[in-house]
Image (cartoon, helix red, strand yellow):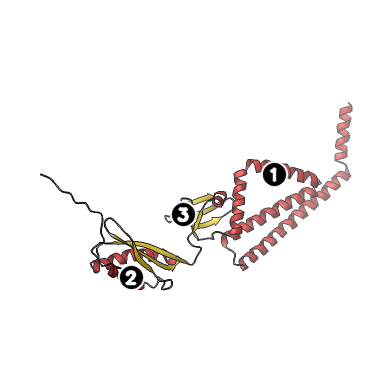
Amino acid sequence: MDELEKTQTYFEKLLSPERLSDFADRLIGLVVLVVIGLILIKVILIIARKALVKGSSDPVIYTFVINAIKAILIITLITMALGVMGVQMTTIIAVIGAAGAAIALALRDSLANIAGGIMIIITQPFSKDDLIDVGDVSGKVENIDLFLTTLKTYDNKTITIPNGLINTSILVNHSKEDLRRVDCTFSIGYSNDISKAKTILQNVCDSNVMIHKTPEPLIGVANHGSNAVILDLKAWCNTDDYWDVKYFLEENVKLAFDEQNIDIPYPQMDVHLKK
């Protein structure tokens, strides 16, 4: 009987006009806070987007920063809403701390990827549309988010790489500089005139406006092979013109050598038959 009376008294206190009025006030405060908070988040995101666009920010970095700001603002709003409902801040902090420790332990690799993404934003080793090599993978940068970087390969395959792996790997950026050097090697026979072959290479370079005159092309004998003399041709061009220049040189040097009777040797073997 005592337990029944205690239960009845508890519910009477819980449903008392004072408690209901306090709950209604808190509920109204919560609704007002959420509405104003969502409006403020939207305004802050609009301002951030305009600031990033005005600063000519990289589109990849733009998306990363906007998502990070949005996540921080939403967490802040949820924390304030719990405070309005009467949850003590010390309790909230304790819960967040305990949850943070558990999450950090369970999501070690994911947190490493987030840290890697932050390091990419800070150091900016590459930008959108840059052609990069990460380990054995090559492709054009399509997107960076909190966890992954997305590349598009030459043959239109999509590759996703964890940011933590990028941050700890050797990275080669082929698009970082405005100029690139196209390196080619050509073989001529030992009976051919080296000076004539070098002149042909120079003329081929001069015929293409995409090849820079300064720095001027470097042409010389690289080594003496078992079947041929190896000539190096190193020409400079704009980074965007790299493959056009590469293919131009490979094709037109072959045509020019054929026209001027310059041999392009290939491995041969003499076989002697004994009767």
Q: Is residue 228 left or right of residue 116?
A: left
- 252 and 170: which is toward the camera: 170
Relative image position of residue 58 (x, y in whole percent): 57, 63
Residue under pointer 1: 100
Residue depth check, mark 2 versus mark 1: number of the one nearer the observer? 2
Give the residue at the far left of this rendering: 275
State yes or no: discs 1 and 3 in contact (Cβ < 8 Å).
no
| Crowd band around label 2 with a 10 angstrom C-alpha radius: few (<14), some (14–19), many (20+) | some
Please give left or right for residue 221 compared with residue 53 in the image: left
The reply to whether residue 133 is in sight is yes
Disc sitting over residue 138 in the figure: 3
Q: Position of residue 104 (x, y in %)?
A: 66, 43
Instruction: Report the mark closest to the observer, 1 or 3.
Output: 3
Sequence-wise, the earlier of marks 1 and 3 is 1
User: Label 2, on which residue?
Assistant: 204
Q: Quadrant of residue 32?
A: bottom right
x then y, percent, for residue 38: 71, 56
> Which residue is drawn at the image coordinates 62% and 54% (left, top)?
118
Q: Position of residue 237 (x, y in %)?
A: 43, 68
Query: Label 3, label 2: how many angstroms apart (C-alpha)?
Result: 30 Å
Q: What amino acid does circle 2 point to? A: Val
Residue type at tag 3: Ser
| Marks 3, 2: nearer the viewer | 2
User: Secondary structure beneath disc 1?
Assistant: helix
